Amino acid sequence: MDFFAIISVILHIFITSKSYNLICNTTRKEQYFFIFYTVIVEFVVEFFFYSIYLSGLGIEKFLYPFILYAYFIWFKKFDKYRGVFLSFLLSLLYHSTHTFIAVTLSSITGDELALHYESIFFLVVLLLTYFVILKTIRYFHLKIKYFDKDYLYPFLKKVTVAFFGLHILLFISDIVSTTHHLNSFGSILSTIVFICLLLVFFAMNSYKVQIEKEIALKQKKFEQKYLQTYTDE
């Protein structure tokens, strides 16, 4: 593994751990253990694919949600639905944002300039990724307590299916981007994934507000009916 690959893994883990902390409101001990787990597993996975000359095809990125899922199920003892939801949420937050920013910046600066100043470009993309993810989490209220409601579970299962579809599409964009004459198509796919992810977050918030309004309305009608019955008596 080259120097940039190692730094990329380290910063990827740092950003994901901060996202996990914001979404699940973890303790410092939990955050350190999460970092330790992901460092060990990611370096093993990265080294394995590097040693068999399959590094750079995006397979590590494709497997990342499953690495997170194992952590949530084995160590956090989450139920499988919450584990799958969080795994794909954290993975898509980082990878779709990072890919979208990298594609956008390279289209602005040009591929040649991005390659010439690779280290600076690499650092700018990661910094922007970090700040965009933080802003996204706060803007869309991506807190597990905010959405961890029984009446939202059926909808969140559909959201998880959408996450999986976006994950597959992002993997396809990575594979396509390795072919030079299809690079533009891969960039378009990654942009579509990022925009669709934001739309899913918007739908999650809209649905929650709508359902809570309906519940409040039903509760109000029930109270009015109860009060009317009590008054009649």
Image: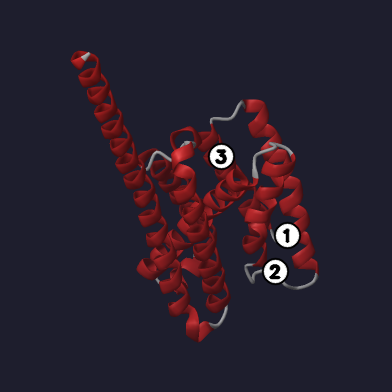
The quarter holding residue 218 reads top left
Q: CA distance from mark 1 to mark 3?
A: 21 Å
Q: Could you tell me the amino acid type at mark 2?
A: Ser
Query: Where residue 87 sits: x, y (%)?
Result: 59, 49
Query: What residue did someone put label 2 on?
Result: 55
Q: Which numbered disc flags the more N-terminal residue, 1 or 2?
A: 1
Q: Which of the two residues, 64 or 181, is positioned nearer the viewer here?
A: 64
Q: Could you tell me the amino acid type at mark 3?
A: Tyr
Q: Which numbered disc flags the more N-terminal residue, 2 or 3?
A: 3
Locate the N terminus by quadrant.
bottom right
Establish if 136 lies above or below 170.
above
Q: Residues within 10 Å of mark 1 (few under 14, many from 20)?
A: many
Establish if 1 lies above or below 186.
above
The quarter holding residue 4 reads bottom right
Q: Which of the two residues, 5 or 191, is positioned nearer the viewer here?
A: 191
Q: Nearer the viewer, mark 2 or mark 3?
A: 3
Query: Where residue 141 sits: x, y (%)?
Result: 39, 38
Query: How is the model colour-coded?
Result: secondary structure
Query: What residue did someone put label 1 on?
Result: 46
Query: What residue did someone put label 3 on?
Result: 20
Q: Residue at x 79, y 63 (%)?
A: 48
State the count of labels: 3
Q: Residue at x 37, y 43 (%)?
A: 140
Q: Residues within 10 Å of mark 3 (few under 14, many from 20)?
A: many
Q: Which of the labelled discs sits on residue 11, or is there none? A: none
Tag 1 near tag 2, CB within 8 Å? yes
Q: Which of the two residues, 11 or 213, is positioned nearer the viewer here?
A: 213
Q: CA distance from mark 2 to mark 3?
A: 26 Å
The residue positioned farthest toward the front in the image shown:
233
Q: Is residue 54 left or right of residue 168?
A: right
Residue 211 showing in the rendered view = yes
